[in-house]
Image (cartoon, rainbow, N blue to C red):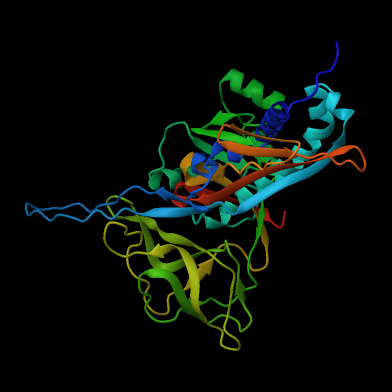
Amino acid sequence: MANTILTPTMVTRKALAILHSKLNFIGSINRQYDDSYAKTGAKIGSTLKVRLPNEYTVRKNATLSAQDTTESSVNLVMANQWGVDIKFSSVELTLSIDDFAERILEPAMAVLASNIEAEAIKMYADVWNTVNTAGTDHPKNLSDWLAARGRLNECLAPKDGNRFFALNSVAMAAIVDALKGLWNPQAAISDQFRDGVMGRAIGFTWLENDLILRHTTGTRDNTTPITDGEQPDGSTLKLKNFDNDATVKKGDVFTIADVFAVHPETKQSLGYLQQFTVTADYATASGAGTMAAMPISPALVSSGAKQNISNKPAANKAIVFVGDASSAYAQNLAYHRDAFAFVTADLEMPKGVDFAAREVYDGISMRIVRQYSISDDTFPCRIDVLFGCKAIRPQLACRVQGKKNE
């Protein structure tokens, strides 16, 4: 059978299918495609606003007390234009699409997909809920994962079949081995034995992902930092009693003594300390051992519809960080699909080239552009994806810490 000259549409569709099939984490989160970028002329800019649910307080008497509705949103910025550049000969253009995919597209798209996936997984740093915090062993007991499930329940994550665990191979092997002797449906056990993965259990789909990142904590010393005076509501903390050259890293998790998490609706204490994550790398003031404005999430909100803590932090309250200083822990994740969003948009099509094509598949837009090089009879080609990702509702996720430095 004669080979068929490959068209730009054939190549783009095949490349996009290859890219999509390798995005395990991105495939499980909220994906948005914005066709506003496909228009020539007026553009919406690089920022997409994602609306968040409204929150209200409950009246507990007969007197009407009308509340204003203040809608809130988060900005999801599409600032990443990543791609792979390749070239091939005029002879290779006559390959079948399967041959072309195996020889040229597969290697190129595999590295692009892995890098995009790893970038999306960095959103773990925006998640403050954390379990298995000691990090003394891999999360090999079902109780470790049930604890994460409990956190999602308390944060009102929907129980709609869109909950996932993303864990590395070490954690997957540990949990499969730990549960092999427990009673389970025969078909599920058979699948676990054949594939070495959990499949679906305890209300979650289990995903094995070896791009799960390890978080290295800051160089904070072994002294216990404390709040520097009573802390007001807001997204920063003023702390003291650090070592003079201590640092904290984006993604470090901590608690404040006597500041408890509350139920999102009733505002009653949940009985455990609210966890926070540091939102940017920060260091002590030179020679002072203080951090004047350490950025944190969630912001401290001690009253009203958005209340998330039992009370404001008082002065001299101990700050306790998760994990040891300068140590690395795998950041396995439990999450509902809507905790994170991944968004792509169309890039403009250039004119005056050999060919250009664009396809959208399952919310991912990809553009391929090819030009002819007369000097060496080749076709330089670029494949581009414009994307952004953000933890839009990080309270719907929870980290399940791995073993220290492994």
Quadrant housing the N terminus: top right
Q: Position of residue 334 (x, y in %)?
A: 53, 44
Q: Nearer the viewer, residue 96 or 28?
A: 96
39 sits to left or right of 54: right
Query: Is 311 placed left or right of 222 in the picture?
Result: left
Please state the horizontal and vertical placement of residue 253, each as a whole percent of the image: 53, 62
Q: Residue at point 41% right, 64% down?
A: 299
Which residue is at 60% across, 23% downward? 188
Q: Look at the image and tell me whether residue 83 can be seen.
A: yes
Q: Nearer the viewer, residue 89 or 77?
A: 89
Dividing the picture into quarters, in which one does residue 140 lie? top right
User: In x, y percent, where is residue 347?
Assistant: 61, 44
> Which residue is more in the foreground, 319 or 341?
341
Instruction: Say which residue appears at 68% left-offset and 41% top-offset.
Output: 351
| Residue under the point 62% across and 55% down | 135
Q: Position of residue 274 (x, y in %)?
A: 42, 60
- In the image, 304: left or right of 90? left
